[in-house]
Amino acid sequence: MVESVEFAKFILSRATVQNIPMGETKLHKLLYICDGFMLALGFNFIEERAKAWNYGPVYPKVRKWLEKTPDAFTSPHECKKETVKKINHIGAEKLVDFILSTYGKWTAAALSLWSHEPNSPWELAISYSGGSMNSPINKTDMKNYFKTFLKNEKNL
């Protein structure tokens, strides 16, 4: 497993290579999508669970890192070599690149709306908690939800 902040840094580095503009909301949603696809592929790789916030899934440790790192979207912040080794070991770079090329074109607002679709893990987390925001999103719900997307993807 890797820290969510480390994986977020990796996403940012790959987004830079693909020239994909990034902001905080978009980063959280792309991290969530990566997490979901990896779970669907059988890898519980990101150690932190997303929380259901108003605008969709958020990783609190990434949020805190971004608050402390005002240049996160303008300057490169390399992830640890150990993280890159783990990413390479499971072939996650290809997955991240696929997700960025597919969902990186979307706006943060579109990604937030998408994360709120009926029966999404975000919606289920809100439902389980009786409507309370900041509820943890169940990784099993994510795995099952993203498995439906894998059926349509031959490249993963």
Image (cartoon, rainbow, N blue to C red):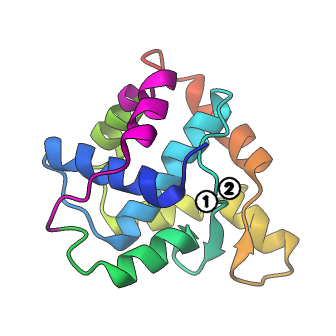
The answer to which of 105 and 66 lies nearer the viewer is 66
Q: Which mark is residue 117?
A: 1
Quick one: quadrant of the N terminus?
top right
Question: What span is in magenta?
Answer: 74-94
For residue 60, above or below residue 81: below
Residue shown at 57% from the left, 81% from the top: 54
Determine contact: label 2, label 1, CB under 8 Å.
Answer: yes
Q: Amino acid at mark 2?
A: Ser
Check residue 89 for magenta coloring: yes
Mark 2 nearby-residue class (10 Å; few <14, some 14–19, many ≥20): some
What secondary structure is the magenta-colored segment mainly? helix
Query: Which residue bears the numbered disc 2?
Result: 120
The correct choice, above or below, for 64 with respect to 123 in the image is below
- Residue 94, x across and y down, in percent: 37, 26
Local secondary structure at mark 1: loop
Picture coordinates of residue 77 (x, y %)? 25, 59
